[in-house]
Image (cartoon, coloured by chain):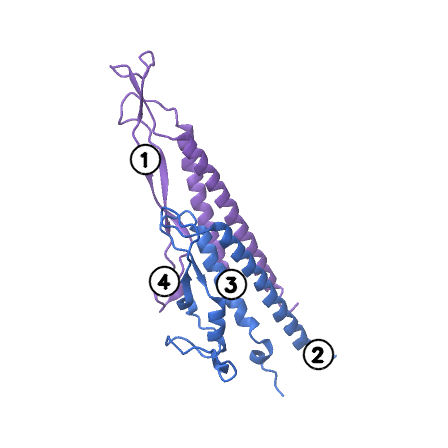
Chain colours: A purple, B blue
Amino acid sequence: MSLSNVFGIAGSAMNAQSIRLNTTSSNLANAESVSSSEGETFRARKPVFTVQAPNEDDYAGMDTALVPGQGVSVSGIVESEAPLRMAYEPSHPMADDDGYVYYPNVNVVEEMADMISASRSFQINAEIMNTAKQMLQSTLTLGQ
Amino acid sequence: MAISFDSALGIHEDALLVRARRAEVLANNIANADTPGFKARDIDFEAVLRGELRGEQDRFSMAPAQTRAGHSDELIAPDFAAELMFRTPSQPSVDGNTVEVQQEMARYSDNAIRFQGSFTMLNSKFKGLMNAVKGE
């Protein structure tokens, strides 16, 4: 029954968006985590979304290029390549020999925008699930 | 005279199947609203409907030819994903994603209402059949 697939699809999207919210909150929490070397510094993390391929058994014998995906999956988390921010703070306990500390490459404005986008997408998918639930419930009352 | 469920229920039984399938496709579009490179898709309900009425092509001149071996004559072919189309976005995004969430949401709601419509028709057909069976 394809209506019950909608639950899986919307669920996968809600899961992906909550992973995105988690990375965002981790990035924001560590936005000021300084360190004394470039290698140790926290870097902003971003999830990578890909279309979840459909289950082969459900569409046996069909051209897979014509079958819609089955939601979204997080294929990995990548670290941002943006340059780190160096600050000259000789009095800082984490300062290196030259007096520099390294700040993470977290862009706070970008993270806030990401957070709003993720929470809106989450809401929309919850709404999709709700509508699918109503459609399914009404089919249960058929003939009554 | 025997009651034939196929002729009594008419098109709505199959329409519900297509509506449920379309809900799946639209939900998938919305789920992938943030996936780079994802192309939004949709089912052309009318095209499926014309395929569905192929068994009565004497009465419907617009009936198309059978293009796929799997297409059956009277029921909606389960592989009507062949009719899955790609959307043309009005505001394409830089990452190649063609999902416009507001539009998809509108189509999804529209689809759900039409599902309810077909369901109501089907339900009243069943009520009519029940009356016929009881003979009250």
Residue topped by disc 1: A80
Name the residue tied to disc 3: B20
Determine if residue A1 is in view.
no
Question: Left or right: where does residue A65 sit relative to residue B100?
Answer: left
The residue mark sitting in front, 1 or 4, is 1
Q: Where, by quadrant of the figure, is residue A86 drawn?
A: top left
Q: Are marks 1 and 4 in contact (CB under 8 Å)?
A: no
* Residue at the far right in the pictured view: B136
Residue at the image position 71 percent from the left and 79 percent from the top: B134
- For mark 3, does the 10 Å Cα neighbourhood hold few (<14), some (14 to 19), or many (20 or more) residues? many
**Quadrant of the rendering where the C terminus of chain B is positioned:** bottom right
Looking at the image, is A10 positioned above or below residue B48?
above
* Disc 1 element: loop
**Left or right of B119, for residue A12:** left
Residue tagged 2: B134
Q: Amino acid at mark 4?
A: Glu
Q: Looking at the image, is mark 1 or mark 4 earlier in the sequence?
A: 4
CB-based contact (under 8 Å), mark 3 and mark 2: no
Q: Which residue matches tag 4?
A: A56
Determine the CA span between mark 3 and mark 1: 40 Å
SS state under label 2 = helix
Q: Are marks 3 and 4 on the same chain?
A: no
* Front tag of 1 and 2: 1
Pinpoint residue B12: horizontal percent, then vertical percent.
57, 71
Same chain check for tags 1 and 2: no
Label 4 neighbour load within 10 Å: few <14, some 14-19, many 20+: few
Mark 3 vs mark 1, foreground winner is 1
Circle 2: residue type: Lys
